[in-house]
Amino acid sequence: MDIKAKRKLVRLKKVLRLVPFLLPAGVLAMSSVASILVADNTRVTAIRMQSSIP
């Protein structure tokens, strides 16, 4: 029981040490995905606007 608890603590410490590195990467990924989606949406709306204009 004690050994397992110690292993869990060690694993937690390793994860916590990685969190500061993972957070910016996650934020960057989210922002890039969001910008891609926004660009896609604007492109689609622009195409629709052009096609609707006679």
Image: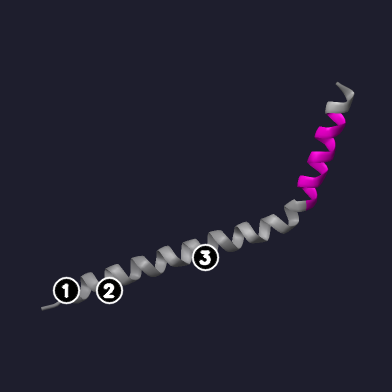
Residue at mark 2: 46
Please tell me which of labels 1 and 3 falls first in the chain. Answer: 3
Residue at mark 3: 32
What's the amino acid at mark 3?
Ser
The structure residue drawn at horizontal position 54% and vertical position 63%, both measured from the top left corner, is 31
Pick the front one: 50 or 18: 18
Q: Residue 51 carries which label?
A: 1
Image coordinates of residue 9 in percent, x first then y, are 84, 36
Q: Is mark 1 on a helix, strand or loop?
A: helix
Is 36 magenta? The answer is no
Q: How is the image coloured?
A: one colour
Q: Residue 36 vs residue 52: left or right?
A: right
Q: What is the span of residues highlighted in magenta in the rendered image? A: 5-17
Query: From this viewpoint, which residue is outermost toward the top?
Result: 1
Above or below residue 9? Residue 48 is below
Q: Quadrant of residue 6?
A: top right
Q: Residue 48 vs residue 16: left or right?
A: left
The mark closer to the camera, 1 or 3, is: 3
What's the amino acid at mark 2?
Ala
Q: What element carries label 3?
A: helix
Please tell me which of labels 2 and 3 falls first in the chain. Answer: 3
Secondary structure character of the magenta stretch overall: helix
Image coordinates of residue 24 in percent, x first then y, are 67, 61
The structure residue drawn at horizontal position 41% and vertical position 63%, both measured from the top left corner, is 37
Q: Quadrant of residue 12?
A: top right
The mark closer to the camera, 2 or 3, is: 3
Above or below residue 33? Residue 48 is below
Q: Callout 3 environment at 10 Å: few (<14), some (14 to 19), or many (20+)?
A: few
Q: Callout 2 environment at 10 Å: few (<14), some (14 to 19), or many (20+)?
A: few
Tell me the CA gap for discs 2 and 3: 21 Å
